[in-house]
Amino acid sequence: MTSQVQKNMSTEDHEITDPVYVEQTRSLNPAQRQAVETTEGPLLVLAGAGTGKTRVLTTRLAAILLSRKAWPSQVLAVTFTNKAAHEMRERVAHLIGGPAEGLWLGTFHSICVRILRRHAELLGLQSSFTILDTDDQLRLIKQIIKAEEIDEKKFAPRVLASCISRWKDRALPPAKVTTPASDLEKIALHVYRFYQDRLKVLNAVDFGDLILLCLKLFTDHSDVLAQYTTQFQYILVDEYQDTNVAQYLWLRLLAQGTGNICCVGDDDQSIYGWRGAEVGNILRFEKDFPGATIIRLEQNYRSNAHILGAASSLIAQNAGRFGKTLWTDADGGEKVHVQGVWDGEEEARLIGDKVEDLQRKGQSLNQMAILVRAGFQTREFEERFLTLGIPYRVIGGLRFYERLEIRDALAYMRIVVQPNDSLAFERIMNTPKRGIGTSTLQTLHQYARYEEVSLPEATLRLMETDELRGKAKTALQGLFYDIGRWRQQMTVLPPGDLARIILDESGYTGMWQADRSPEAPGRLENLKEFVNALEEFESLPAFLDHVSLVMENITNTSAEMVSIMTLHSAKGLEFNTVFLTGWEEGLFPHQRALGETGEAGLEEERRLAYVGLTRARERAIITFAANRRIHNQWQSSVPSRFIEELPLDHTNHFTIGGRTQSFLRAPTPKLPTPPSRPSGEKKFHVKQRVFHLKFGYGCIVGIEGDKLEINFDHTGRKMVMKSFVESAE
C-alpha cells in the first residue's frame, strides 16, 4: 500500500489533500461527484454510455482509501473481465500514489478462487484443486457418456456441457434442478450428477463451480460468511446489468454486513441474456436494498447531440428500464444517416466508397468500424475491402476464411480440384467421423513417406491390399468414390451448386445440423454464405485462387485498419465513424431472438441497437437492404422497426440514388426504389400476374399496405414491397 494511505490511515474520516486526486475530482460533473461522495449505504449508479463510468468507479474507490474509511483489505471491487480489473487497478494506483496492497479487486471468478482456496476443506476439496478448462470439461463429459452408454450422436457432449453451465449460472446444483421437461434435459441432469461426483474425486472444479461452490460455502457455513461480511466494509461492482443469478446471489450475501454496496451499470446496455445475464438484477436493486440511492449519469462525453437524441428515442421504446436521457454540452454534429440499398453487395460497395472518402479527408482507418448483427454478414465487407485494398481486422472472431467450418469446406473443394492435396485430404478424411482412427492415419503417413507419394495416393494404393481393412477401408472407398464423382460434376455444374452438393453428400452440413451447441447455427449460416461466395465465380479453381490471395493479403496488412465486428463485440469500444449494417426485420431484430423469448428478446435486441449507436462519436451510418441473401436464398427485406423508432429531427434518410426521403412516418416503411425502375403509384390486385427481379414471375395472393404477398413460380410465397414488383399482364 502507498505511504500516503499508510501514514494517514485512522478510524476517522480524513480530508483528502492528495494533489492527483484533487485534480481528478475538480473536473467531475455534479452527478459524478455525488456518486463518488455517496459512500454509505446501497447505491446504484445508472451510467449511460460514454458518461465516465470507469472514472467514477475508480475515483470512488480511491476516495474510500484516501479518506481512511477502510483499509484496502476491507474493500471488494468486482469486475467482469481481467482487462477491466487491470485498468481499474492502474487508475486507482495513479490516484493514490502507488499500488493499494491487499485490495480485493478482480473478476467474480478470481475472487471466488481466492476464497475457495482458503476454505476448500469445508467443501470436501483440497486447496490445491484444479480448475478445468473447456477441453478438460468436455473430455470428462465424454467419459461419463461412454460409461453410461449414452448415444453421443443424439446427445452431443458440448450440448450437455452447455446445459450444465446454464444450471450453474442459475445457482442450481443437481439436487435443485426441477424435473426436466425434455429428453435432452433428463440426460443432461443424469450426466450432471455423475459429472459433479467425478469432479470431487479428481479434486477439480470448472468455472461454473467457482461461484456455485462459494454460494454453498456461505450458505452452509454461516461463520465463514460472517467473516467476509465483516471484512468487506465497502463493495463495488462494475457492469452490474451483466450479472447472472449465481453472481447476484453471491453479492447479496456479501452485502449483508455494512450494506455499503455500490453497483455501477446500465440497464439499457444489458445485451448478454443469451449467456445468462439477468437484466432483472439491476431493475430490482431498490427492492433488494431498501433505502438505496439511485444516481443517473446522463451527461455524455463521447457522441454528438444527434447520435444521442436518436439513441435515447430508440431505447425509450423499452418498457423494462429505469429511464434516463443522455445529453451533451457539445453543439452541432452530423445527423444519423439512414441509407437504403438494393442488396448486401451494394451495401458493401457503399460502405467501401464511404471509407475511402473519409480516409482521403484525413480520418484514420482505426477510427472506423462496421458493426453487424450476424457473423455471416462480414464476408461481403471483407471481399469488398480486399478488392479496394483497404486493410481491415475482424474483432472478437476470426476472419471469414479462417473459421473452422470454412476451412473444412475449403478442404473439400481443394481435394476435388487437386487430387494430391495431402493436407486437405487429411483434414476431411474423418470430418465428419467415418470411423478412420489414429492407427489407420499413421499407416497411411508411414507408407506415404516411404514411397514418397501424397497421402491420397498412398491411400489408394493401400486400399488394394490388406493393409487397410474393415470399417476404415469401406469408409475410404466411399470417400474416394464421392470425390471422383464430384470431380466429374465440376465440369458441368456451377461452383455454388457443386459446393452445396459436396457439403450435403459428404455429411458435413448434416454434422452441424445435428450439433445442438450454441455455435452450430452460426456455423451453418457461414456455410451458406460460403456457397453464396462461390456463385460469384466461373469455376471452383478460380474461387480457390481467389481465397489463396485473400489469405495472403491478410498477413500483409498495415497497422491502420478498419474494424469489423458483431454488435455484441462492440460493447465498451468507441469510434469516430460507425457503420450499422443490416437493419432489416428478421436480421435485426433477429428472428431467433424474437422467436425464443418474445418481448424480452425484442427489448434486448433494441438494447443492442442502442449499444451500436452509442459507439459512434461523430458519425453513425445505418444501412438496410431491400433484398438480402440469407441461408442461400434471396429474401425481400423490410426495414427494421428500429429505423421507424428513430426521430426525424436527428436523422437523414436517403434512397440509393442519394435523394432525401422519409421512410419512417408512412404506415409501412418504404424501401428505396432502384433508379432503373419507373416511378409513380402502382396499382395491384389479388390474382394479378407480376414479375420481381430476384424471384421472377408469380401471382399476388394478398395485399397489405405497401406489401404484397406473392406466390412465386420457383421460390414459393414471399412478402415483398410493391416498389420492386412490375405487372406481367
Image (cartoon, rainbow, N blue to C red):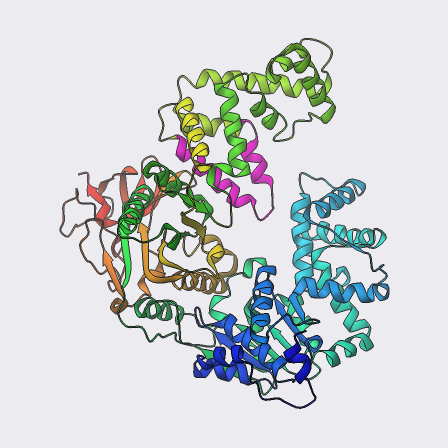
Q: Residue at x 57, y 77 (%)?
A: 284
**Quarter holding residue 385:** top left
* Left/right of residue 72 with respect to residue 492 in the rendered view: right
Q: Residue at x 36, y 75 (%)?
A: 327
x then y, percent, for residue 656:
22, 49
Q: Is residue 531 magenta?
A: yes
Quarter of the image with the C terminus is top left
x then y, percent, for residue 114:
74, 65
Dominant secondary structure (helix, strand or loop) of the stretch shown in magenta: helix
Boundaries of the magenta span: 505-534
Residue 433 visible in the displayed image: yes
x then y, percent, for residue 590:
44, 54
* Nearer the observer, 456 or 298: 298
x then y, percent, for residue 67:
61, 85
**Quarter holding residue 197:** bottom right
Q: Residue at x 42, y 30 (%)?
A: 549
* Nearer the observer, 23 or 44: 23
In the depicted structure, whether residue 527 falls above or below residue 244: above
